[in-house]
Image: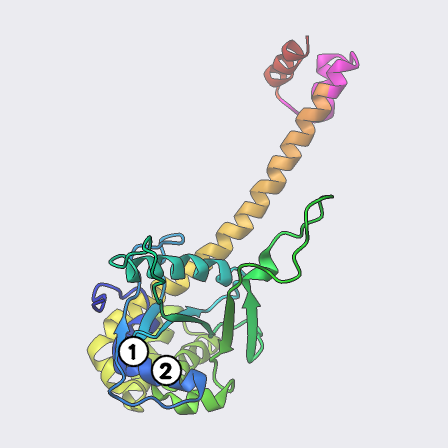
Amino acid sequence: MNVNKNHKDSVFSLLFSNPDTLRELYCALEGISLPVDVPVVINTLNNVLFMDRINDISFEIDGKLVVLIEHQSTVNPNMAIRLLIYIARIYEKIVIDKKIYSTKKIVIPKPEFFVLYDGEAPYPDKTEEKLSDMFEKVTLSGLPEKVNPLLDLVVRIININEGKNEEILKRCQTLSQYSAFIGKVREFEKEGRKREDALIEAVIYCRNHDILGEFMKENASEVMNMLITEWNWDDAKEVWHEEGLEKGLEKGREEGIITTARNALSEGIPVKTVQKITGLDLAIIEKLQDNNT
């Protein structure tokens, strides 16, 4: 599979968009060393969407291992199911030319899953999420409860904020400098700068202190645009969540008032009295009364 040159959905995925940085990153995460001649082939998907977002990084190592890495700035408890969908699509691409219906067993690369977290909310240095933790509990009489799940997927979540997992950051200079850059943006924001100004100052600071130096020189404007888009997206998701809760509560209140009006009418309470009790428009109450008769 060829490198997906169109995949530049985030600063993180752009930064780790070549085999050498991916090899360095994987070795840091696993605490190992790989010879530079071990082939790393990027196969990041560009057509598996979650609310217009695509998966961050997928690559094969020597055709024997397939690694999926996601970058998250917000806590997301559903990464296991997302990564299950991603790996299924990647395996689909890997075996497309293989004879999966033949009598001979085909061999596929072993999967590994990572989420790298750099959000502001407190989070452990390292933790795991399992797909099996999301399964519905079987409580119906007569249905067997399996002790061991027949399908599972384990995601290792690693906090890459400054001061966290320092051994990993030491082993991967690119990841360490990315963490330092994000830390500078947040530092300037806490000092009262607007987000765009904080980004500009962080880019200038990093260029002057040789933090992601060449990367910043070549991609400064793209980095700012990407991060503004990413962080505005995270803000939007929070707003949608809050608005969804408000709308749900409002809908619940409306449905409760309608039920009250319908019950009052069924008890023979006059329309005008029901209007005073519920505050509903007279036309709505009259329509409810017609439906009750």
Q: Residues within 10 Å of mark 1 (few under 14, many from 20)?
A: few
Residue located beneath label 1 in the image: 62
Name the residue at 66% across, 52% down: 137
- Residue 93: where, in percent of width, then height? 29, 59
Q: Quadrant of residue 273?
A: top right
Measured along the vertical axis of the image, is residue 100 above or below residue 112? above
Name the residue at 26% across, 86% down: 213
Circle 2: element type = helix
Residue 273, visible in the rendered structure: no
- Residue 228: where, in percent of width, then height? 35, 65
Residue located beneath label 2 in the image: 25
Q: Nearer the viewer, residue 196 or 260?
A: 260
Magenta residues, start to end = 263-280
Q: Nearer the viewer, residue 192 or 233?
A: 233
Q: Earlier in the sequence, mark 2 or mark 1?
A: 2
Measured along the vertical axis of the image, is residue 115 above or below residue 215? above
**Color style of the picture:** rainbow
Q: Amino acid at mark 1?
A: Asp
- Residue 106: where, in percent of width, then height? 34, 63
